Image (spheres, rainbow, N blue to C red):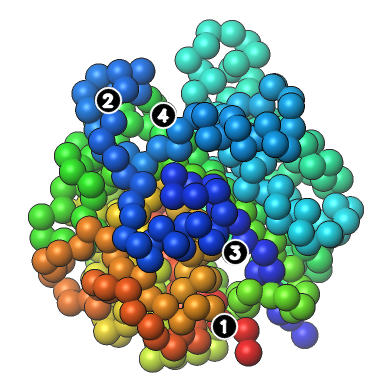
Amino acid sequence: MIREVYINETNCITPLGFDVASNIEAIVRGDSGIQLHQDIALMPIQFYASIIPDEKIKSAFEKISIDTKYSRLEKMMILALEPIIKKSGIELNSKTAFILSTTKGNVTALKNDSEESFNSAHLDVLAKNVADFFKFQTQPIVVSNACVSGILAVSVAKRMIQSELYDTVFVVAGDEVSEFVLSGFNSFQAMSELPCKPYSKNRTGVSLGEATAAVLISAEAKNAKIKVIGDSSINDANHISGPSRTGEGLFRSIQNALKEAQIEVDKIDYISAHGTATPFNDEMEAIALNRLGLQNVPINSLKGFYGHTLGASGLLETVIGIESVNQNMLFESKGFDEMGVSESINVIEKNHEANIEYFLKTASGFGGCNTAVVFEKMK
């Protein structure tokens, strides 16, 4: 019999707060972390992004460690993990795995021309530094697959538990807003001149953001927040940066995840989508969802609250999605105004109560990668 898999603990570090409760409170109020920034160290022109003040990270980290060797991103990841490791009381032995998910990791280290800085930019070094802080006994595993990384890490953890290699897996995902990331998206002409507007007619691109999120995934149902019942990842290899015009990879990912979950499309009560607010991504998602018969399911993008947090986005949005399920509350897709995709979808315009039994998390990324995971509320 295949093992059942659960998410037992969650946490997140974002511009809206340094725990899940404060993030939900901010979302309910309609607050957004996206602000106008003028920082020539990051970009020569002003830009909209969701950035955590350095002082907040520093002061929070000093409460748990006086060690100064950690990078800014490492501190953010440690801050996300520390409460859930402590609360769980789980022994970090040979049956406990650690997965770190990121798109760019410590890419800012490359600004310094030294061998030490170059070495610290390697993703395995980032993972080892975070793992060593907590004294994990198992070798850390890195999941880095563009912008599906955060939710893909949940899929990987699920399969590791079902294989009985591990009983528990701690997952952390994170990325920073950096000069490298800003210049990259700006070169694609993919950055919005205003806070992003997912699925809207007048959307012009992404607002970037930074965050870390952490979860505990296990085979133990006790105190579980949600059950992971199906997952799939498909790469349609459409283009290095452009999504499939027919949504083929996303379509197949969702189809496979639903098949493993053994539920029909009409059972899905809520979709937490990728929704980057770029013209092609949002259009592709609408096409894929219509092909599957999911066009009437309430859907939101949290990018209007957090910006696009790259490798953190899938896990952060899963953490918020779990709260939606357990609070029976659908959160608005902030920034949405007038429908701007060719196929009809049911975008959530205002917070409202709803009974949610099953929810679907999707993500898509550069290179044609797509991931879908289906979750079930704990009975």
Give the residue number, with chain letter if any, for mark 4: 178
Give the residue number, with chain letter if any, for mark 2: 38
Q: Which is more toward the observer, 142 or 356?
A: 356
Q: Nearer the viewer, mark 4 or mark 2?
A: 2
Circle 3: residue type: Ser
Q: Secondary structure at mark 1?
A: strand
Q: CA distance from mark 1 to mark 4?
A: 37 Å
Please tell me which residue is depicted at 76% across the width and 54% down the height of the picture: 85
Q: Position of residue 71 (x, y in %)?
A: 61, 26
- Tag shown at residue 377: 1
Please tell me which residue is depicted at 77% across the width and 85% down the height of the picture: 1
Give the residue number, with chain letter if any, for mark 3: 155
Q: Residues within 10 Å of mark 2 (few under 14, many from 20)?
A: few
Determine whether 354 is above or below 125 in the image. below
* Residue lying at the far top of the rendered structure: 113
Circle 2: residue type: Gln
Disc 1 or 4, which lies upstream in sequence? 4
Q: CA distance from mark 4 to mark 2?
A: 13 Å
Please tell me which residue is depicted at 31% across the width and 68% down the height of the picture: 332
Disc 1 or 3, which lies upstream in sequence? 3
Q: Secondary structure at mark 3?
A: helix
Please tell me which residue is depicted at 60% across the width and 16% down the height of the picture: 117
Q: Nearer the viewer, mark 2 or mark 1?
A: 2
- 32 relative position to 162: left or right: left
